[in-house]
Image (spheres, rainbow, N blue to C red):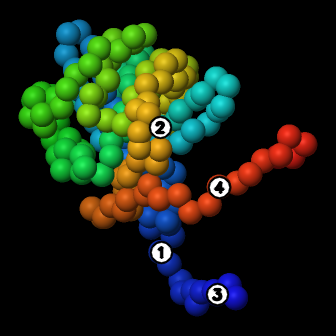
Amino acid sequence: MMKTYRKQHFDVANVRRLLEPGPVVLVSSAWQGKQNIMTMGWHMMIGFTPALFGCYIDESNHSYEMVTQSGECVINLPTADLLEQVIGIGNCSGADTNKFERFGLTSVPAEDVAAPLIGECYASLECRLADAHPNPNHPLFVWEVVRAHVASTPKLPKTLHYRGDGEFMVSGREIATLQRYPDQRR
């Protein structure tokens, strides 16, 4: 028998805590000989072919100028063992901190962009800016993934998901596999 839930009113300002789109990522950037990393929890996949990744980066963030000037970045997928680094990176500014050095992370040269990969991350996606749309709150950046680097194991890494107010959860356990048949359509 399926479980039903008794629900109560919930503050709509906090629904994002229920609907966060995906794992926390570390965005690495490079501009004029400097590198930076920022922690990002708000992002979304918005295209398949080409692979398009959308995110907001506030103008007050040090990475904003680096990615707008270079038109490039790397989206790095950290695993749960990097929780302290993820939080620390998000709580300091690259304007006055070399985050690679401070958090003991390895800057690995990318193949197609100037921004570095983070060696300790499970996956790194090299991106070029495809489009940027200003809006009254934040500019929406649309990145095209031009090269992907992904570890062969584990199959399902334990990734971090930010729920707001300093609360994280971990995913990485497969609960079911959808089987597709050749004649099945979506």
Identified at 57% across, 38% down, the residue is 45
Q: CA distance from mark 3 to mark 2?
A: 35 Å
The residue identified by callout 1 is 11
Q: Are marks 2 and 1 in contact (CB under 8 Å)?
A: no
Q: Residues within 10 Å of mark 2 (few under 14, many from 20)?
A: some
Q: Residue at x 53, y 58 (%)?
A: 174
Report x, y in % for residue 165: 30, 64
Q: Which residue is mark 3?
A: 4
Indicate the secondary structure of the residue bearing disc 2: strand
Kind of element beneath mark 3: loop
* Contact, mark 4 vs mark 3 (Cβ under 8 Å): no
* Residue at mark 2: 55
User: Which residue in the structure is indicated by mark 4?
Assistant: 177
Mark sitting earlier along the chain (2/1): 1
Amino acid at pointer 2: Cys
- Look at discs 2 and 1 and give the one toward the viewer: 2
- Answer with the quarter of the image where residue 166 lies: bottom left
| Mark 1 Cα-neighbour bin, 10 Å: few <14, some 14–19, many ≥20 | few
Q: CA distance from mark 2 to mark 1?
A: 24 Å
